[in-house]
Image (cartoon, rainbow, N blue to C red):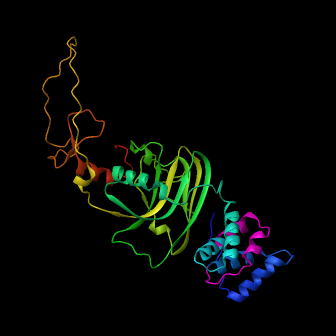
Amino acid sequence: MTVNSVPAAGVDVDVGVDRLAMHAFSQPKIDPQQFIQLCLSLARLQRLCTLQSQICRRHCDSSMLAHVMVLMISVKNACQSGWFTEKDTEELSNLANEISSSFCSTLDFKTEPSSSLTIISTIMSRFYPRLKMGQIICFLEAKPGFGAFVNDFQITKNTNLSKGEKARLFVAQIDNLETSLCLITPPQVNFLLNGTAVGKRNIELMDLGPQLPTPVSQMLKFGMNLLQAVGQFNGNYIIAVAYMSEISTSVEATLPDYEQPPVSSVDPDSEIIEGPSRISLNCPISFRRFKTPVKGNSCKHLQCFDFENYVDINSRRPSWRSL
């Protein structure tokens, strides 16, 4: 869905409302071009009228319906800001959901991250130690199977961001968080922001390995924005647009102490006897002296690798296939 294909004409509020009222209540055939321009013009205005209900109930073709949805996103935001009475707010919100249902496979999906904050925290600390997640501004939760999910969110000019914070798209499969496979984008799903495909997260251009959260600041705008996720999901996913910043890792705070596994009893009949082993004090990745030697949780090798160097290498790569 695209919302910028037709330029919105500058329309006076009262004139625009009168013209939309004519389209809503009159029987003659409407001019599609003029209808689209009026919807987009009033979507940018600070005054909205209760004739929205008539606009939404009027039969529209698919091209008009997309532009009505743009208008209703602004209406829904106005409802949340307390512009209408409680009764009108309920009616307009229901209408906005009705219009949205034309672009969603279901409206029964979570748009609040509260129940997933623990999972997100686990993923960030385990796989993205150099990134700190700040405010989550948009959230979706998708279940296995084909789905079309749409969620709108607002960005205001007075948003307080910490130094270095940028908006990123976070996608993770939550069925198994033990390996970095949970960071692979579902291969048959398109992610779009404001009608534009997100780089390396769409079917035409897909990174097949685990990905870092994708920077999307340039795709967003002040005011209302739209996140879409459409396609065949191969598991349970959480999707978020959030402000993130790069940080220097605190090794002591992120790494637990290594626990030596219990020594198994030696089988007296075994012909294999473990002898002495030599371990290098240089990292096998960088070939430099260890600063912080680490191993994977389930690794049984005696040789370690250096934590800082490992994180640096994988942070520079477009996909973390070596994790």
Instruction: Name the residue at 44% across, 42% down.
Output: 176
Q: Quadrant of residue 73?
A: bottom right
Q: Camera-side residue: 101 or 283?
A: 101
Q: Position of residue 294 (x, y in %)?
A: 23, 43
Image position of 210 with respect to 1: above or below: above
Number of numbered markers: 0
Q: Residue at x 76, y 65 (%)?
A: 61
- Image height check: is 129 above or below 218? above
Residue 22: image quadrant is bottom right
> What x and y, as percent, mark residue 49?
70, 81
Write the residue at 51% across / 75% down.
Answer: 222
Instruction: Work out which quarter of the rendered image holds the C terminus and state it.
Output: top left
List x then y, in percent, for residue 189: 56, 50
Name the foreground residue: 86 vs 102. Answer: 86
Regarding residue 66, the answer to whether it shows in the image is: no
The N terminus sits in image quarter: bottom right
**Which span is picked out in magenta?**
44-70
Q: 88 or 37: nearer the eye?
A: 88
